[in-house]
Image (cartoon, rainbow, N blue to C red):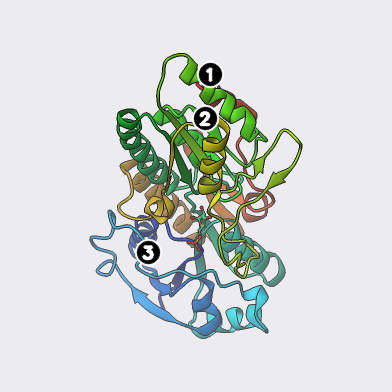
């Protein structure tokens, strides 16, 4: 009887998920394995929701955003008997291996299921936030940075026409990678990220210096996880309205852009407008770079699963796709280094 590989996508969706699914299915099929979609992340294994996946089902999905097999932020370890249900449904569906495509949360669950219950699982690093350890880049990030950069380019022309300060709030949760990369690429005048305690006063001073040099407009990129920080030493995290947490304990972020815009206007007197890019950064078709990266990750993950090398994650090191342990990948977040922030800072003001 043919062996079967399960595939699930968990956490926030991102462009490139379908490219991974296609690659896993095609490589499995070429080796005589069947593939099965586990619907909506870990929820599909807790509740036993499966769907057959073959070359026909994955045909034409390479450029498509989102995930054709659905996703959720379900955490089996937060549910009564969750891990046991996962294992039972895995056995009942007669799966031989599982490819889990996700970020720190989804892969954190995979790491625990492997360590504590010997679930035969391999991981693929997905997130627009690029904050997974053990890999130079995650797929989805390049697309998000491309979208944010295009937005910054567009805001430049309207900022200049109206002599305004434009604040752009981007995603990234606790990592400022999207802000730093899109800010550098888009020529931002100030970039504020969670990892760096740049104060509101210092940011305003950069804008004043720039305007004193004769510039009449500015672009400020702020990462959603940046805490408004003041010279007095006070700081304030601005979270979303509901301040809700998901099953992984994350507060819904968002809103710092508006708060920062008000502060800039109050401190400098420069007319300020705010744009929150939000989920636009996660939608739509992946860039060619993300399609290629996702495809290479998918092939590697399938190869690891076929070879029985579980507890591993496909990763990018330099230009090579390698395997790293899920434990290493989920041990800590990969945050923006001061070297990268220095590149951005060279163009402040
Ligand atoms: O982790 C990806 C991400 O887009 C973060 O950048 C953001 O904070 C979060 O997900 C938003 O989550 P949701 O789609 O559940 O609002």
Q: Please say whether residue 337 is visible from this viewpoint.
A: no
How far is the residue under mark 3 from the one under mark 2? 34 Å
The N terminus, quarter of image: bottom left
In the image, farthest residue toward the top: 213
Pointer 3 or 2: first along the chain:
3
Say which residue label 3 marks: 67
Give percent across and percent down for residue 245. 62, 67
Q: Is residue 19 above or below residue 70?
A: above
Bin the neighbour count of mark 2 within 10 Å (Cα to Cα): few under 14, some 14-19, many 20 and up.
many
Q: Earlier in the sequence, mark 1 or mark 3?
A: 3
* Distance Cα–Cα, label 1 vs label 3: 46 Å
Residue occupying the point 24% across, 69% down: 56
How many marks on residues?
A: 3
Reading the image, the residue beneath label 1 is 209
Neighbour tally class for label 1: few under 14, some 14-19, many 20 plus, Cα within 10 Å: few
Tell me, for residue 264, which label it has, or none. none
Q: Nearer the viewer, mark 1 or mark 2?
A: 1
The yes-or-no answer for disc 3 within 8 Å of ligand 1 is: no
Secondary structure of residue under mark 3: loop
Q: Find out whether the residues at labels 1 and 3 contact each other: C-beta distance under 8 Å.
A: no
| Left or right side of 246 for 41 | left
Task: Of the two numbered discs 1 and 2 on the same chain, state the one appearing first in sequence.
Answer: 2
In the image shown, does 26 or 37 lie closer to the viewer?
Answer: 37
Q: Position of residue 109 (x, y in %)?
A: 62, 66
| Position in image of residue 201 (x %, y %) | 63, 31
Give the number of the disc on residue 190: 2
Residue at image location 52% in from the left, 29% down from the top: 190
For the point 46% across and 13% down, the residue is 213
Q: Secondary structure at mark 2?
A: strand
| Above-or-below relation of 105 to 271 | below
- Of badges 3 and 2, nearer the viewer stands 2
């Amino acid at each position: 009887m043919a062996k079967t590989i399960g595939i699930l996508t968990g956490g926030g969706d991102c462009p490139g998920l379908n490219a991974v699914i296609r690659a896993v299915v095609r490589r499995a099929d070429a080796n005589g394995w069947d593939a099965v979609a586990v619907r909506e992340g870990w929820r599909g294994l807790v509740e036993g929701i499966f769907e057959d996946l073959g070359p026909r089902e994955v045909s034409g999905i390479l450029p498509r955003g989102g995930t054709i097999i659905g996703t959720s932020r379900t955490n089996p370890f937060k549910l009564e008997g969750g891990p046991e249900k996962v294992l039972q449904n895995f056995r009942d569906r007669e799966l031989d291996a599982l490819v889990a495509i996700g970020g720190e949360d989804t892969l954190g669950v995979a790491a625990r299921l492997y360590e504590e219950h010997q679930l035969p699982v391999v991981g693929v690093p997905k997130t627009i936030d690029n904050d997974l350890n053990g890999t130079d880049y995650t797929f989805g990030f390049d697309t998000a940075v491309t979208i944010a950069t295009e937005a910054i380019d567009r805001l430049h022309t309207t900022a200049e026409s109206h002599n305004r300060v434009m604040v752009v709030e981007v995603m990234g949760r606790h990592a400022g990678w999207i802000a730093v990369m899109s800010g550098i690429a888009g020529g931002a005048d100030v970039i504020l990220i969670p990892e760096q305690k740049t104060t509101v006063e210092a940011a305003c001073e950069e804008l004043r210096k720039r305007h004193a040099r004769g510039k009449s407009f500015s672009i400020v990129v702020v990462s959603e996880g940046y805490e408004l920080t003041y010279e007095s030493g006070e700081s304030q995290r601005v979270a979303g309205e509901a301040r809700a947490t998901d099953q992984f304990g994350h507060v819904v972020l968002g809103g710092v852009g508006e708060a920062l815009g008000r502060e800039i206007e109050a401190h400098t007197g420069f007319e300020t407008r705010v744009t929150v890019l939000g989920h636009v950064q996660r939608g739509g078709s992946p860039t060619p770079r993300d399609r290629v990266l996702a495809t290479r990750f998918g092939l590697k993950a399938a190869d690891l699963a076929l070879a029985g090398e579980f507890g591993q994650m496909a990763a990018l090191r330099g230009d090579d796709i390698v395997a790293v342990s899920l434990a290493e990948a989920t041990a800590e977040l990969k945050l923006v280094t001061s070297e990268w922030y220095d590149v951005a800072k060279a163009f402040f003001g």
